[in-house]
Image (cartoon, rainbow, N blue to C red):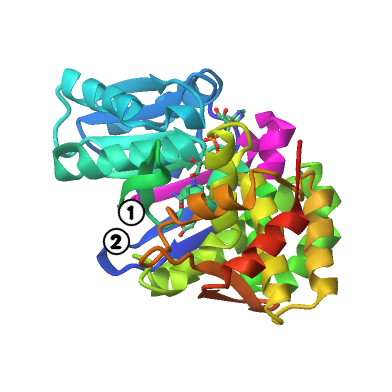
Amino acid sequence: MAAASSVLHQVPIALGDRSYSIAIGAGLIGDPASWSAAPAAAHGVIVSNTTVAPLYARQLQAAIAPRHQQLHLVVLPDGEVHKTWATLNLIFDALLGHGCDRKTVIYALGGGVVGDMAGFAAACYMRGVPFVQVPTTLLAQVDSSVGGKTGINHPLGKNMIGAFYQPRLVVCDLDVLRTLPPREFSAGLAEVIKYGPIADTSFLDWIESHIEALMRRDTDALAHAVRRSCEIKAAVVGEDERESGLRAVLNFGHTFGHAIEAGLGYGAWLHGEAVGCGMVMAMELSRRLGLLDRAWVQRVTSLLRRAGLPTVGPALGADRYLQLMRVDKKAEAGEIRFVLIERPGLAVVRSAPDALVREVIADCCRPA
Ligand code: NAD
Ligand code: GLY
């Protein structure tokens, strides 16, 4: 018998004929009703990894079995270091090996790495098959499963190969967050906190007053955090799906963060950890440009610490940071573009003098 389930919130993503809904609740994965908005098709393919598949693939298989004549499971190696062409090919090998047709539905069961790769595979296979996001990390529930960015890493830059390709449905089951390791959970909180400075200071107030409940993984607190994060992301993506402008604000903390990830080697710091620390550096840069006051930088830094996140960057050297940040997708003609906080709750994308960036790196980074 399926466990009792409850949908606590539904967040719509309004993108014309690519619109879809995010269901947020408890016990959703194992409930066949959760999947009624997904297309039915002869083949269903669950893409997961060696950590998540043993935990949740059986529940999902049982719940979606009535929707497909044949169900297949592709289990990828776990980790950011495997977000590569070679791993992507394992998905194509399975799709072709099982004779999957162009109506095949791909279910991405896992964190952001699985979601980005399964989504990219769905975008490419037979020039596009439907896919469903089943995010199992907090980071994936509040950010990566929503909005249609899919892709893989290249040794010279993170997420450099990919496509915009929207899922048909996102199902955020809060129960699965119970098995998430503490470090991964904190990394997800970085992306939750991100939405405060860029879009909603009252959400930041709420996070500050509920950080202990969030750290305890209280279901009501998580439901609100996931819902509000998805609402903010949905509003931004609804206005600028392909990042011709506004959507770049969602990359707050990512310019410095991607340099940390690439500079240390993917996987040394978690993506959310690097983004959290990158937010401190971007706020410090905003302060040096006269946009923010010190108290505000300290306020967000302290919240990141309470969320269990590092707030001091690794000392890669200013030259290395600058070199890595020039590979960022926001860079234009070699000029680095930062997401800065113009005032609390409002982000802006702009360049900054290298000398100021070097000061920030010197102040915010220490040798390990
Ligand atoms: P991840 O996918 O590597 O998952 C983190 C770890 O947790 C993995 O070991 C995973 O196997 C494990 N895990 C997942 N769910 C679990 C569960 N319920 N219980 C126990 N273990 C579980 O990392 P992530 O933080 O979810 O995602 C990071 C990735 O997302 C990066 O590659 C980043 O570039 C990408 N990302 C994409 C977007 C986007 O818009 N597409 C946005 C943000 C981040
Ligand atoms: N995570 C940034 C974006 O989706 O645009």
Question: In screen coordinates, is 122 left or right of 103?
Answer: right
Region rendered in magenta: 164-187
Question: In screen coordinates, is 72 left or right of 176?
Answer: left
- The quarter of the picture where the C terminus appears is top right
Disc number for residue 18: 2
Which residue is painted at 69% across and 40% down in the image?
Answer: 185
Q: Are marks 1 and 2 in contact (CB under 8 Å)?
A: yes
Residue 25, image x, y percentages: 59, 47
**Residue 29 magenta-highlighted:** no
Looking at this view, is 58 or 256 the one in front? 256
Determine which residue is flagged by label 1: 166
Which residue is painted at 56% across and 47% down in the image?
Answer: 320
User: Alpha-carbon neighbours of circle 2 within 10 Å: few (<14), some, or many (≥20)?
Assistant: few
Looking at this view, is 359 or 228 the one in front? 359
Which residue is painted at 82% across and 61% down in the image?
Answer: 208
Is 54 located above or below residue 160 in the figure? above
Residue 349, image x, y percentages: 51, 73
Question: In screen coordinates, is 173 left or right of 286?
Answer: left
Camera-near label (1 vs 2) is 1
Q: Which quadrant of the picture is home to ligand 1?
A: top right
Amino acid type, callout 1: Gln
